[in-house]
Amino acid sequence: MPHYVDLHAHYLPALDDGATDPAMSLQMLRAIAALGFSELFATPHQRAGMFMPERAAIDRAFEAAQAQAVEVDLTAKLGLGAENFWDAVLLQRLRDRTVPSYGGGPAFLFEIPNQLMPPNLENELFDLRVGGMLPVMAHPERYAAIQRDISLAEKLGRHAALMVDLGALDGAHGKAEMKTARRLVLEGLATAAASDIHRPADQTSVAAGMAWIRKQRGPAALDRLLDQNPRRLLSGDLPEAGEA
């Protein structure tokens, strides 16, 4: 049986643009677990001026979700991280070594503006790796600079993990995103893949993305992108391009 790890999900209720209440949260957990995921990491947004729930609120929501999962005998293990927007708040947290990461470990999830690549990003990521942290870039297929020049993904991937959204592989987020996500997977530039689930109905596109990987790259590649590599990321290990 598969034991996949989902490193990007918004199932904690009433914190961001994901689940709105505990009932929806449970639906989402069941939807992803039904696809073979045994570890489900919540990654609530941390973005100044938009979604910035306090740590205490995140912890309360996570504890409630864990209790709910136990109550209904959900066998999947829940974990906690955050989707950190590349802004002044994140940069300060990185300097202070207080960035919300996966389980308090070296790997942390981040996103950037879709239309504007932060200046000096490649060097910033290099410095973070040298400092012992592991940046994980959320949905690289959405970023216009990567859509225009796939070689940029190769450069960034030397210092950060690139984690595509499974739904994007099925066209759930647009044609340009689908084309880029597929290229990243086919060319071995994607380190991992994740659900980025926001609603229970997202299960359909997530499953379709998994089926596409299995058909185009084979079951071994699906295991690497959803099981082996995510576990390596959690331990702070960055697979080289092509290992996916």
Image (cartoon, rainbow, N blue to C red):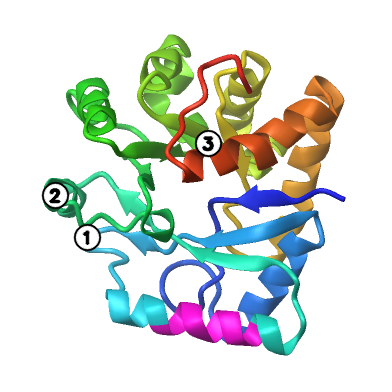
Q: Look at the magenta stretch and give its main secondary structure.
A: helix
**Residue named by callout 2:** 88
Please report the residue visible at 52 percent of the width from the left and 68 percent of the height from the top.
Answer: 18
Q: CA–CA distance between discs 3 and 1?
A: 23 Å
Q: Is residue 217 left or right of residue 52?
A: right
**Kind of residue indicated by mark 3:** Met
Q: How many residues crowd around disc 2 within 10 Å: few (fewer than 14), some, or many (20 or more)? A: few
Measure the alpha-carbon separation of dots 2 and 1: 8 Å
Instruction: Kindly tell me whether residue 68 is visible in this rendering.
Output: yes
Instruction: Specify few, some or many for label 1: CA neighbours under 10 Å numbering under 14, 14-19, or 20 or more.
Output: some
What label sits on residue 163 in the rendered view? 3
Secondary structure of the residue carrying numbered label 3: strand
- The residue depicted at 58 percent of the width and 41 percent of the height is 230
Q: Which residues are magenta?
A: 60-68
Dot 1 amino acid type = Ala
Q: Is residue 62 magenta?
A: yes
> Is there CB contact under 8 Å for labels 2 and 1?
yes
N-terminal-most mark, 2 or 3: 2
| Residue 48 tag number | 1
Residue 23 seen in this snapshot: no
Q: Neighbour class for label 3 at 10 Å: few (<14), some, many (≥20)?
A: many
